[in-house]
Amino acid sequence: MQHVLDNPVWNALISGDAALGTGTGEARYYDRQVSPFAGIKTYTDKSFETLYQIMPEGVAAFMTPVPVAIPSYWEPVITVAGYQFVFDTTLEPAPVTSSLTALTDEHVPQMLELTQLTKPGPFDLRTIRFGQYYGVFDGDKLVAMTGQRMHVFNYSEISAVCTHPDYLGRGYARQLLLHQIQLITAEGKIPFLHVRGDNKRAIEIYKSLGFSIRSEAYFSFVKK
């Protein structure tokens, strides 16, 4: 039987994130200002065609544990290889010692500025709707943040982990990650996340916090 995290976008859109997307019983996609990710129930030509027919024009992103051949009527943009990590829930999360601020709609302009600078992954005007975004401020300036993205049955994804380049090395990402782990495990759910394969610094941080690689992950961005 396929694990729910083998097809995380589809399974999020039929469970915890159902209210953030739309589609059919074969293909679904997020509100375009929330996320470019789209999911199909099975990776068949029929499902790809269904999604193509119902999606508005623009970029779509697929996430799979193995490379997938995408029909040629989609225009390829880029494919990024990485890993899917899952937290070992037998571990007790370390305490959070930093002061973190809950982020709201008023912070979205700064969140967009920070993600455009650091490129943690797709982030748009309504991405905050995924919920549980927290940040670190230097005065009025947002210098680090993270939040959640896909909610797949009893799994919750930590996402948008980013720190302004001028504030690296201060442990902000670690504190934000520990906080997210605590939030998710307190709900009786399991934290997971995705990372680019070449982001060695992030990979080491995740491993040190109790995450381990569950599978490879491929992010395919295409255009309709």
Image (cartoon, grey):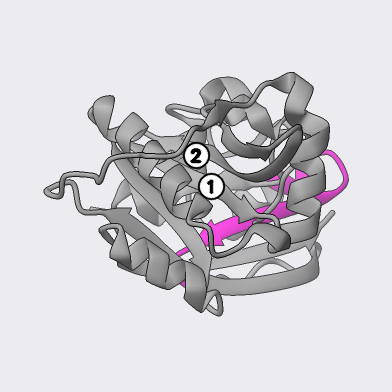
Point out the frontmost of discs 1 and 2: 1
Farthest residue in the front direction?
A: 139
Residue 104 at what x, y percent from top left? 67, 21
Instruction: Judge the density around disc 1: few (<14), some (14-19), many (≥20) Cα neighbours within 10 Å.
Output: many
- Note whether 93 is above or below 167 in the view shown: above
Disc on res. 150 = 2
Q: CA distance from mark 1 to mark 2?
A: 9 Å
Tell me the amino acid under the disc marked 1: Ser
Q: Residue at x 23, y 44 (%)?
A: 93
Q: Residue at x 50, y 73 (%)?
A: 201
Tags 1 and 2 touching, CB below 8 Å: yes
Q: Residue at x 31, y 55 (%)?
A: 86
- Residue 216 in sight in this render: no
Front-most of residues 51 and 150: 150
Which type of secondary structure does the marked residue at label 2 adopt?
A: strand
- Note whether 96 is above or below 91 in the view shown: above
Front-most of residues 36 and 199: 199
Image quadrant of residue 22? top right
Which stretch appears magenta?
A: 51-67
- Left or right: 75 with respect to 25? right
Disc on res. 71 = none
Which type of secondary structure does the marked residue at label 1 adopt?
A: strand
Image quadrant of residue 65? bottom left
Residue 153 at what x, y percent from top left? 34, 32
Q: Which residue is mark 1?
A: 159
Residue 218 at what x, y percent from top left? 54, 68
- Left or right: 39 with respect to 93? right
Q: Looking at the image, is mark 1 or mark 2 earlier in the sequence?
A: 2
Residue 168 at what x, y percent from top left? 60, 63
| Residue 212 among magenta residues | no
Farthest residue in the left direction?
A: 90
- Residue 151 in sight in this render: yes
